[in-house]
Amino acid sequence: MLSRRDFASLAAALWAEAVASAQQHHHDLALQVAPATPVFFTAKERATLDQLTALIIPADERSGGALAAGVTQYIETVVCHAQKPLQTAWQTGIRPYIGAANPTVLLTAAAANEFRPRTPAERFFVMLKDACVDGFYTSREGITKELGYKGYTFLREFPGAQPADLKPPPGHQPLLRQRS
Amino acid sequence: MAKIYDVCIIGSGAAGGMTGHVLTQAGLDVAMLEAGAKRDPSELPVHRLRRWNLPKRGLRGDYFQEYLEESKFLIDDKKEPYGWVGDDYFQFVRVRAVGGKSLFWAGVTPRLGVEEFQPLDDHDTRWPISYADIAPWYDKVEALIGVSSSGKPLGAFPLNNGLPALNPKVAELEFAKVAGKLGKGLEMIPIPKAILTKDHNGRPACHYCGPCWVGCDSGSKFDSLRVFINTAEKTGKLTLMPGSRVRSIELDKEGRARKAHYYDVANKTWKELEAKQFVMAAGCVESAHILLNSKIANSSGLVGRYLSEHMYASIGGHLPQLTGRAVTNEDGNGAHSFIPDLTKNWRGKKFLRGYQIFPGGSTGETTFAGKSIPGFGQQWKKSIRDYHTAGASVLFQGEVLPYRDNRIEVDEKLKDDAGIPGIRFHFKYRDNEKAMFKDMMETGEELLKAAGAEYFPPKNPTWSPYGHSIHYVGTARMGADPKTSVTDSYGQSHDVPNLFVHDAGIFVTAGNQNPTLTILALAMRGSERIVDRLKRREA
């Protein structure tokens, strides 16, 4: 199942721990009248994250992308509750992008080796991209607008599929890659 | 003077509900002690709580568990702690509400077959009843609660007494086409589910809104609250007492059960209730927990032992023939087709017993394919949308053999907020489960390959955490010999004549099938016997 993947690397394990810890925070917040937004990043770091997440998941006619989905806030909530090494990894990873003239170029370079990341910049890209996928595709914006998910609605009957000789659409190329 | 009830039932889930139903229909005066609150079905989180409302977004550990925690239907483990040994974490999911776990089950109702009751191997298994003994009650339960048909018998898997079968989903058909080509004799058939495919006994047919484990808003899925408890209350014979956490059962001088001691959660006071008969139906772990705390019914030393469940494993991929489709509502009510246990065709000396396979997929709520697709930006997003309609997975549910040392024990240090000693799990999979798991992964890869899937062989495959199935069985196993079992085949204690166990505690093995239908059948059979015995005594 999807939730059981991608927990091999240390970063992923730390990330997961941070997500769990964020939940505890959420429970604690539930007791307060006005829950505070967790603050971890500086204003510059946050603005840079907004910029980067929007480059990875841009807005278009379907949805408002990472910005509308609050992916930066999702990341900040998780990192806020993370252990120190993961927090540091985010801070140092963002640094080269702060005030960068052309972040797209930097991102593209960091992405070139994303299934065999070796350098800190390449590793940061993977961490950022995975967090974007987690944050966006579990958000209301991502699920209902981007993916156009149609579930949780009523059907009078479930007609069932008919046996058919289904083929991949013309020009389909296998895209999936495994990270090493 | 305090009232003395004919029967006190402890627990209100599938077993307790069925027992209450049969006994109140027979006119008996019944008290039901339930630790959780009675909550209106409109409080079920269905359609209100969505993935984006969850702080972890279902991304760590277990979506189901996080969902129920957020909906406040689960026990708070801090208030009622439990333990495990070393690294052997046991995922113990406890629903606290009238209706119990039946509110949140997925509704899958396969019967156990001939070979589950009389296994072909000599592992420590002696059911005192055969399939033929229980089959009439399977028939009756299915007619009462309404289940969908499994279409036809297959191998040792029996045909049920069902309403129309569920229609197959598109990804299921892709697997159905190739299942037979593996040379293993695999075949997909409709899943039998306690989800109505047409109106039945005053309940409406399913409206296919999605995952049934979030709770059913229409009552089309069987749950104990709406099918049994509410109707039993209308007879005027059921006194339902929510918020009553039972600590122990007290015996009288003759060794008969006389009183239940329970904690009134709302008033934080201790109370007691007298009855002529007691039925344990708190779920196999909690029932054994109460018996152990009571220090009764355990001359065999087996209360709490032979705890079993199902091993879960899965492998996922994407089916290229399903990429780039238009998004439609194809959730149905979860899986609609499955492969019953046919491992007898090849398991040979590899492992004992067998497993069910649930191959399927759909255009689901979310996808994480983006992590495996190179790049970022608009084109990358488009590719994710294409793969979103192609997600597929093969899920396995296999029998964990019953082992004497897989057990719960009372741990006096783990006291709950009322001071009741909690339990610690001693639980491990052994060589047979490891061999079965390996075979599951091989078969999963064969199915994905045959269906043409894009997938990656798992790098470090592992089974789901112990307890993940929530199909806890054993702990008060039935049998003919009081030395090697806790109850007889009707759930009557060998030691305490007016004490009965009606939940999955009395299972001798887990089989590979989901347990609820068998819980209901055994509870109905045991309850009818209680009624018969009382009538004969009065006659």
Image: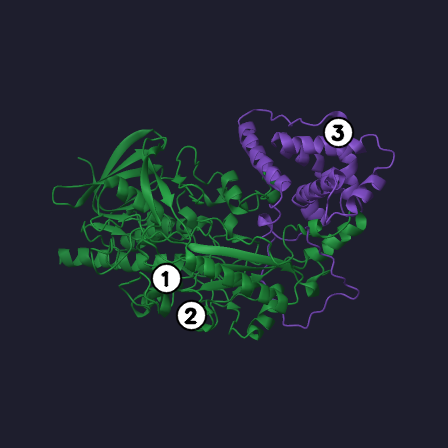
User: Does A134 appear above or below B127?
Assistant: above
Subunit of label 2: B
Mark 2 vs mark 1, CA separation in Å: 18 Å
Q: Is residue B372 left or right of residue B138?
A: right
Q: Among all residues in the image, which is located at the extreme left?
A: B254
Q: Amino acid at mark 1?
A: Val
Label 3 sits on a secondary structure element that is: helix
Q: Which residue is mark 1?
A: B141
Where residue B443 appears, as percent x and y from the top left, is 54, 65
Mark 1 vs mark 3, CA separation in Å: 61 Å
Q: Would you say residue B207 is visible in this rendering?
A: no
Q: Would you say residue B441 is visible in this rendering?
A: yes
Q: The chain coloured green carries which letter?
A: B
Label 1 sits on a secondary structure element that is: helix
Q: Is residue B476 left or right of residue A70?
A: left
Q: The chain coloured purple carries which letter?
A: A
- Residue depth check, mark 1 versus mark 3: number of the one nearer the observer: 3
Where residue A64 appears, as percent x and y from the top left, is 76, 42
Q: Which residue is mark 2?
A: B157
- Total residue callouts: 3
Crowd rating for badge 3 (residues with CA inside 10 Å; few <14, some 14–19, many 20+) = some
Q: Is residue B242 left or right of residue B494?
A: right
Q: Amino acid at mark 3?
A: Glu
Q: Nearer the viewer, residue B23 or B402?
A: B402
Q: Pointers 2 and 1 in contact (CB under 8 A)?
A: no
Q: Which residue is mark 3?
A: A45
Q: Among all residues in the image, which is located at the extreme right?
A: A101
Q: Pointers 3 and 2 in contact (CB under 8 A)?
A: no
Q: Nearer the viewer, residue B141 or B279?
A: B279
